[in-house]
Amino acid sequence: MKNNQLDNFESLIKSALDKQRVPYDASDWKKLNKKLGPANKPFYSSPWFIAASITLIAATIYLTSVFFYSETTEDLISSEEPKNTKTEIQGKPKNELTTSEKENNKIKEDFINAEKVISENKKEIAEVESKEIEYIIKSETNQSEVKEVVSENSNEQITHEENGYTPLDSEFENNMIVETKDEVTIEKAAFHMSTFECCQGSTIDFVAEKQNDVEYLWSFDDGSYSKNENPSHLFENAGSYKISLIVRSKKDNTIMTRSNDQLLIVHAKPLVNFEWEMNEENGIPYTSFINLVDKANSWSWNFGDGSISNEKDPNHTYRNKGQYLVSLAATNVEGCTSNTNKDILINEDYNLLAPNSFTPNGDGLNDYFLPAALNRLNGNFTMTIYSQAEGLVYNTKNIDQPWDGTNQKAGTKCKEGSYVWVVKLTNEKGQTEQYKGAILLLK
């Protein structure tokens, strides 16, 4: 029964609501739209969407960095792992040191460690000396005060303690003695050098005082070290070098002695260079040499044909064409010498511009023989003509007396054939030169 009554009540309510009509009001829609916001507003402008996007980006960056760091760490670890046996056998690593470099580095390490020990010992010695000086000053001061008190009170017996003077007690004395015994006194190691001044590229010999059961540690101040008792060392670069020697015991590596640094001065060699150019004067070719040496005061040239010169910028005439090795040595004020060599090419022969033949037949053409250069040099000369069969046939010292094809001794005409001529002259530098060649006499 109760269920039927409830059903009748709901039917009554529904019937009443169906008949109910709510009047339309346009402003209600405006109010609703205002609460909902614009209908066409994009979804990604929502604050919630923006916040979610920022969170997602941050998480992505974090995960990426973690992954990159993990990969990089693995790469670093793998790169630090030792190479396998096959790789080492196949090829020597580029950075591997040579045996001599390894040995030098080992001696260097020993020398530096020894220097540290010496430095620490010096500090300990300084502290002991400071205590000794402090005690001496205090002792002298107290003794002076005692003397003053005694002089003022000559009839009274004054003890040291009464005047504030404390004598050196046995305990302090023992401590001082122990410290003096325990301190490592580094004596001066003695050695000798073959010289204290040399030129760049010199090898210097070093000799240490002979000691038994010791090890020698040399420092040459150029990055090189040695354990030899009497080493020799090449100094390739100029500069000042402090040579040091430390001697230590082979038994327990105790530092025995340490030398005073000895100064070695290595002077620079001059930088040697030169150029050249071909010239001609009065038909006579010559080569001009241009000295490009820096900081030198003497020079020595060798022109490669047996001729030399000590001039700074010499000229030289080559008689025969060909290639010549020219060398220049230069010495600076420190006495250091260096040199350089260069090849030069001579394209033409020069033999006083002498002709190959002449025809002394009296036709006025080519009737005389005389090297043309003798007319241009204007110097003293002697020309001699030789025949294979008759020996000396002509001799002259005058450019106005060329050879006319006669035998000067016999006063007769020479036969057709080849003759040898020799010219000795004094050049403009006062040097003696000799030239020779062959001349063909034709009728």
Image (tube, helix red, strand yellow):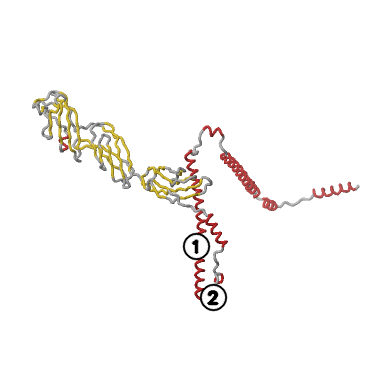
At x 75%, y 51%, the residue is: 22
Image-based side of 352 in relation to 192, left or right: left
Residue drawn at (55%, 67%) of the image: 166
Disc 2 + disc 1, Cβ < 8 Å:
no
Q: Residues within 10 Å of mark 1 (few under 14, many from 20)?
A: few
Q: Amino acid at mark 1?
A: Ile
Answer with the quarter of the image where residue 205 lies. Answer: top left
Quarter of the figure that contains the C terminus? top left
In the drawing, what numbered circle is on residue 133? 1
Q: Considering depth in this image, is 309 or 199 the residue closer to the camera?
A: 199
* x and y percentages locating residue 325 in the rendered image: 30, 35
Please tell me which residue lies in front, 93 or 305. Answer: 305
Query: Helix, strand or loop at disc 1?
Result: helix
Mark 2 and mark 1 lie on one chain; the one further toward the N terminus is 1
The single residue placed furthest to the left in the displayed view is 411
Q: Nearer the viewer, mark 2 or mark 1?
A: 2
- Quadrant for residue 165, please give it: bottom right
Asked whether, in this view, residue 112 is left or right of residue 23, the answer is left
149 or 415, nearer to the observer: 149
Secondary structure found at label 2 = loop
| 263 is higher (above) or lower (below) than 280 | below
Per the image, the residue denoted by label 2 is: 156
Quadrant of res 168: bottom right
Q: Position of residue 357 (x, y in %)?
A: 16, 27
In the displayed structure, 72 sits above or below 361; it is below
